[in-house]
Image (spheres, helix red, strand yellow):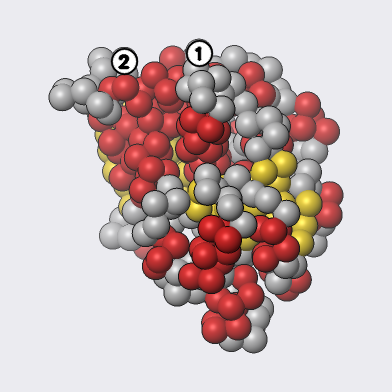
Amino acid sequence: MRHLLSTEQLSRENAIQILDTAQEMSAVGEREIKKLPALRGRTVVNLFFEDSTRTRISFEAAAKRLSADVINFSAKGSSVSKGESLKDTAQTLEAMSADAVVIRHWASGAPARLANSGWIDAAVINAGDGTHAHPTQALLDAFTMRAHWAKLSGNPSVGADLQGMRVVIAGDVLHSRVVRCNVWLLRTLGAHVTLVAPPTLFPVGVEHWPCEISYDLDATLDAGVDAVMMLRVQAERMNASFFPSTREYARRWGFDDARLARLDALNLKDTIIMHPGPMNRGLEISSAAADSPRSTVLAQVRNGVSVRMAALYLLMSGELRTEQSDAAAQHPTSPSSTDLPSAKDPS
Ligand code: CP
């Protein structure tokens, strides 16, 4: 496998290989000198057409911990604002000998376009494209769940997959690239996933995804849950009113203080609360929940560096095994070029 574009392309074996490698990489973060020589002399370009804090910084940290040279490119302040196309931008970076390009783009399908166009030779890693996919986020979420699941089993060496884990993902499913990647990866790893959202924030066709859907967050908690992942309300992608008010949203679909207390009342003492960040505190998650001992928000950020080290290393060394997942073969849902917005076509 040359590129990492979505989690649908990952077989169980691919996913486990990345997670196991990330586990080894996490040991580097514990050392006094947090460096490996694995990618010395190689160049990683971070190509960000959309804002990011966690993903951009952790890809940079990951590449540096592997001793790669790193070029950070942000569309703001670049010649993109003068109208330069994705193709010309990418080829400019290729001319600087990029071995891997980590790309975040507002257009769903831009990373696939870059990977399949023949414009560049570098490995392409999708760092989030439109509402389509964010595979390294899903992998770091799975890594975080796996550590928790292994601890619960009492045997940290177990944890090959998430068989039997009950995961609830709640919030703005419609606009979330994180949820799409999580549903596919968690299914591949054996978890049972329930999505919760207001009816207006489910996409058309969600009934065909490999998960349950619900409109009632309390009912899903009452049924028993091992991990609750709250999704950010993506106001910047909303061009209409999707719920009556922020207060109503927080009361019905937010993980508020009452729901935090509900986990205790239900004796769900080991349930973790996750959020990919950035968080809208007081909307989809209360501060008490975000800062509680159940919260894995900062662990997710920490784990992101290890997972991105693993992804960079495996793709750039050519060691990621090449089997395609059954899911990818049966559900080829990666956006085609016709899904790309024409007004600001990335080519
Ligand atoms: N979770 C995530 O992608 O965060 P950033 O937008 O800060 O990278």
Query: What amino acid type should be assigned to the residue bearing mark 2?
Result: Ala
* Quadrant of the snapshot with the N terminus: top right
Image location of residue 228, percent across then percent down: 58, 53
Asked if residue 84 can be seen in this view, the reply is no
Query: What amino acid type should be assigned to the residue bearing mark 1?
Result: Glu
Q: Which residue is painted at 43% across and 52% down in the image?
A: 295
Furthest residue toward left? 32
According to the picture, the residue beneath numbered tag 1 turns out to be: 319
Asked if residue 70 can be seen in this view, the reply is yes
According to the picture, the residue beneath numbered tag 2 turns out to be: 38
Q: Secondary structure at mark 1?
A: loop
Residue 86, relative to residue 123: is it above or below? below
Of the image marks 2 and 1, the number of the one nearer the N terminus? 2
Image location of residue 172, percent across then percent down: 61, 65
Q: Quadrant of residue 330?
A: top right
Mark 2 surroundings: few (<14), some (14-19) or many (≥20) residues within 10 A: some
Residue 144, relative to residue 19: is it above or below? below
Image location of residue 314, percent across then percent down: 47, 19
Image location of residue 115, percent across then percent down: 56, 34
256 or 305: nearer the viewer: 256
The number of discs equals 2
Q: Which residue is painted at 51% across and 21% down in the image?
A: 155
Q: Quadrant of residue 33?
A: top left
288 or 240: nearer the viewer: 288
109 or 297: nearer the viewer: 297
Q: Secondary structure at mark 2?
A: loop
